[in-house]
Amino acid sequence: MPQLPAPDYPADVRARLEADGKEIVARYPDSRSALLPLLHLVQAEEGYVSRTGMAFCADLLELTTAEVTAVATFYSMYRRGPSGEYQVGVCTNTLCAVMGGDAIFEELKRHLDVGNNGTTDDGKVTLEHIECNAACDFAPVVMVNWEFFDNQTPESAKRLVDDLRAGREVEPTRGAPLCTYKETARILAGFPDERPGAVAATGGAGPASLAGLRLAKGEVAGARVVHPRGEGPKDAPQPGAQHMSSHDAPQQTSASDPAHPAGPAAEEGE
């Protein structure tokens, strides 16, 4: 059966969203260009992009709901249904998967008793696999509301989600302090992060991400000698050496490491 028209927002909510929406539209010479941040705006209101939110965007931009729906369903950053306060994304793309991302994702599914895109009963955590977090230097990577948690293991990832569900303070490896999914959506809509000290705390890229830039600028890093697991001398590193990422020295972050609690990676088909 055809769906009935989406219900409108309550009058006070619509008035507030219209004021914010017009501020967003004013940034662009072509109003249609404001659609992506407007979708973030309505997502900040409900925690996902509802039919009501898409109808609101269509009205404000004088588009059809079909045009708005086509955009909202194309990008995975827009949720299509109610989700948790914290969006926990586990990278399962090639490098993170090899380094242990698949093991982390499977362990979190069991630990939280949810599937992909599933939300815990308390409404705190939604778990999803992500194709790439654009942080391969620190694989395997987990993101919470788009903030980085680098070099994870199944055990550290379980502690992370347990802390989120218990309301304990969680600090990303780098980047801005963690906030809720709705707060993140409003920031992505282009509104300032008004939390005291949040902007100053964002920092920059990690050292592994800057290695190529330093080489291009002629800055020579200290010598590093990395031996295979279980081989080579175990004395102190050479002067000037530094650990850049999980790729530079052996770390127990990969499911392919037989010594890792996750166990060795299974052969295809097993």
Image: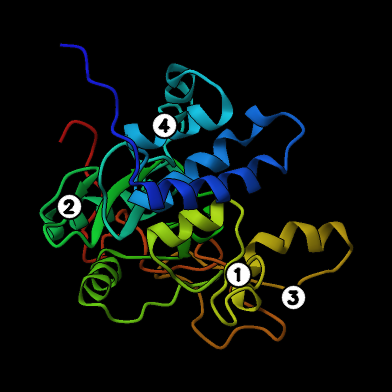
Q: CA distance from mark 1 to mark 2?
A: 30 Å
Label located before the other in sequence (3 or 4): 4
Residue denoted by label 1: 244
Residue denoted by label 3: 222
Label 4 SS: helix
The nearer-to-camera label among 3 and 4 is 4
Task: Classify the position of the N terminus by image quarter.
Answer: top left
* Image point (49%, 82%), residue name: 234
* Image point (21%, 70%), residue name: 165
* Image position, residue 18 (x, y; %): 52, 45
Q: Are marks 4 and 1 in contact (CB under 8 Å)?
A: no
Residue type marked 1: Met
* Image point (65%, 48%), residue name: 23
Residue denoted by label 4: 54
* Image position, residue 228 (x, y; %): 47, 64
Label located before the other in sequence (1 or 3): 3
Nearest to the observer: residue 165 or residue 261: 165
Q: CA distance from mark 4 to mark 1?
A: 44 Å
The nearer-to-camera label among 1 and 2 is 2
Label located before the other in sequence (4 or 1): 4
Outermost residue, top side: 1
Q: Are marks 3 and 4 in contact (CB under 8 Å)?
A: no
Q: CA distance from mark 2 to mark 4?
A: 31 Å
Residue type marked 4: Met
- For label 1, count other residues whose C-alpha is less than 10 Å away and answer few (under 14), some (14-19) or many (20+): some
Residue type marked 3: Gly
- For label 4, count other residues whose C-alpha is less than 10 Å away and answer few (under 14), some (14-19) or many (20+): many
Residue denoted by label 2: 109
Q: Is residue 144 visible?
A: no
Q: CA distance from mark 3 to mark 2?
A: 41 Å
